[in-house]
Image (cartoon, helix red, strand yellow):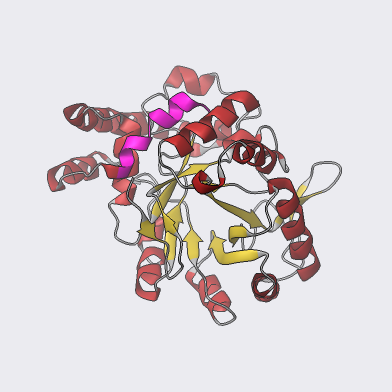
Amino acid sequence: MQTRQLGKTDLLITPIGFGAWAIGGEWRFGWGPQDDVESLGAIRQAVSKGINWVDTAPAYGLGHSEDVVARALADIPGSERPYVFTKCSLVWDDSRVVRHDLSADSIRREVEGSLKRLNVETIDLYQVHWPRWQAQTDPAPGSVGEAWQTLAALQAQGKLRHLGVSNFTVEDLETAQRIAPVASLQPPYSMLRRATEADLLPYCEDHGIGVIVYSPMQSGLLTGAMTRERVGQLAESDWRRNNREFQEPRLSANLAVVDVLRTIGERHGRRPSEVAIAWVLRHPAVTGAIVGARSARQVDGVVGAADFRLSADELDQIERALPRD
């Protein structure tokens, strides 16, 4: 599988990375109960197919995703081990209540916690998960500046190889850049969620910042496997039940888009999921896409997107099919 340079770093990453959000299991923004054996198989299958990076976070399952990633990596020879990317700023207490914290002491605790759970000496890419968090109404401790200064110091100590951010605005990026270089941005991006095209992607392209997007399949909606019946059967603890893209009237419009993706994919022997990911990867600012999978079978259904290219006519066909808000 081809690789691309992530921003100005020495990391050469595959166009697709393994996303470990869902395998974290149940928490406030979980995807319902998960099978760890299936999750381990998914990570191993991804690596065997050539994917060379895994994106996780402590908040995913409140430490559980990082634990599962570590278990999977323990069985992979050193020469084949993928890069590990994780995050900070979302922490939890003994009652499993998640809150936002960018203070220096909290950041240092998070780094040490992730190093221990992942069983590594250095984290390849360490990202601020959120500069602020809409799920918390009270003012959070710390600031982007305090967090970035702390991370730069930890990087100098060799605990973190590169520093990235997630869900930042251009203003947040500029704040961090004044302190230390930002290696990458991780924003949400799919054909159903395109706000990042307006300013963030051009800014990153102009400033040599790598972009690894999340939810390119709109959290499973564009895979071709999602139906109205399946949406109705999502677990009570699956956060997608309350997401507007999974509710009418948007659900019907989105499933109509999937029909177009299916038609395009069939011409090439590709799945709708691969078409959706290839659409995201077409953007020149995008270095890679984080693609979640919970089984080896799901990995097989997306990995082909890494070298799939859509024609101009096919891109126009998709554009015409997209819902207009």
129 and 232: which is toward the camera: 129
Q: Report the label total.
A: 0
Image side of residue 120 versus residue 276, left or right: right
Part of the protein shown in magenta: 294-306
The residue at 42%/33% (across/down) is 221
Q: Residue furthest bottom?
A: 178
287 and 272: which is toward the camera: 287
Q: Is residue 123 above or below residue 176?
A: above
Dominant SS of magenta comes to helix
Q: Residue furthest left?
A: 313
Image side of residue 196 versus residue 79, left or right: left
* Residue 34 appears anywhere in the view: no
Q: Position of residue 220 (x, y in %)?
A: 45, 33
Image side of residue 20 versus residue 170, left or right: right
Residue 22 in the magenta stretch? The answer is: no
Q: Position of residue 273 (x, y in %)?
A: 35, 33
Q: Is residue 104 above or below residue 271?
A: below
Image side of residue 82 versus residue 35, left or right: left
78 and 32: which is toward the camera: 78
Q: Position of residue 271 (x, y in %)?
A: 30, 29
Rendering quarter of residue 211: bottom left
Q: Is residue 256 above or below residue 67?
A: above
The residue at 30%/34% (across/down) is 257
Residue 305 in the magenta stretch? The answer is: yes
| Quadrant of the frame with the N terminus | top left
Q: Residue furthest right?
A: 94
Q: Position of residue 166 (x, y in %)?
A: 54, 59
* Residue 48 appears anywhere in the view: yes
The residue at 46%/61% (across/down) is 11
